[in-house]
Image (cartoon, helix red, strand yellow):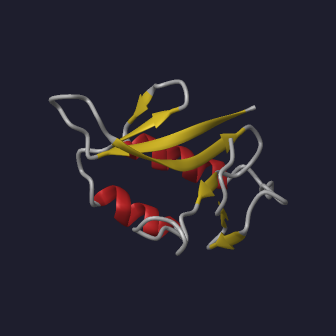
Amino acid sequence: MGTNYYFRYKICDGCGSYKERHVGKSSGGWKFLFRAYPEHYDRPIIKTKDDWDVFIAAHPNGCIVDEYELEHSIHEFWEMVESKQKEGPNMHYGEHDWIDLGYSFCSSEFS
């Protein structure tokens, strides 16, 4: 069982609308699996953890929300990702398209 995380940005205080990108999934005993947005998707291109860092930093009013609608601070989210990296060698083999600096990335939709 795992939990998906999303980054909400361009949040309108007036009407509550927002844009959202799937950041990835945390599963018990596995390293975090990032969602990638390569060239054939809308800009900006996101293919590395650093790309996610830049994208999130570019939207300071954005927030991380899990699939259960629980909000997490950006700091808490990155701490969770880093703790998942230390859990061992378990990667999402067969689900990821590439590995960047030890982080797994998948360029297709997943749940």
Residue 97 location, quadrant: bottom right
Find residue 33 and report its horizontal and vertical position in percent.
66, 53
Viewer-proximal residue among 11 and 81: 11
> x%, y% of residue 71?
41, 30
Q: In this view, does 60 lie to the left or right of 109?
A: left
* Residue drawn at point x = 84 percent, y = 60 percent: 94
Q: Quadrant of the N terminus?
A: top right
Name the foreground residue: 95 vs 101: 95
17 over 35 or under it: above or below: above
Query: For residue 34, what is the image quadrant?
Result: bottom right
**Residue found at x 65% / y 55%:** 85
Residue under the image location 78 percent in, 57 percent down = 95
Judge whether 98 appears above or below 16 on screen.
Answer: below
Of residues 4 and 42, the one nearer the viewer is 42
Rendered location of residue 81, percent (x, y):
56, 50
Q: Residue furthest left?
A: 14
Q: Residue at x 55, y 72 (%)?
A: 40
Q: How many marks?
A: 0
Q: Picture coordinates of residue 16 (x, y %)? A: 25, 29
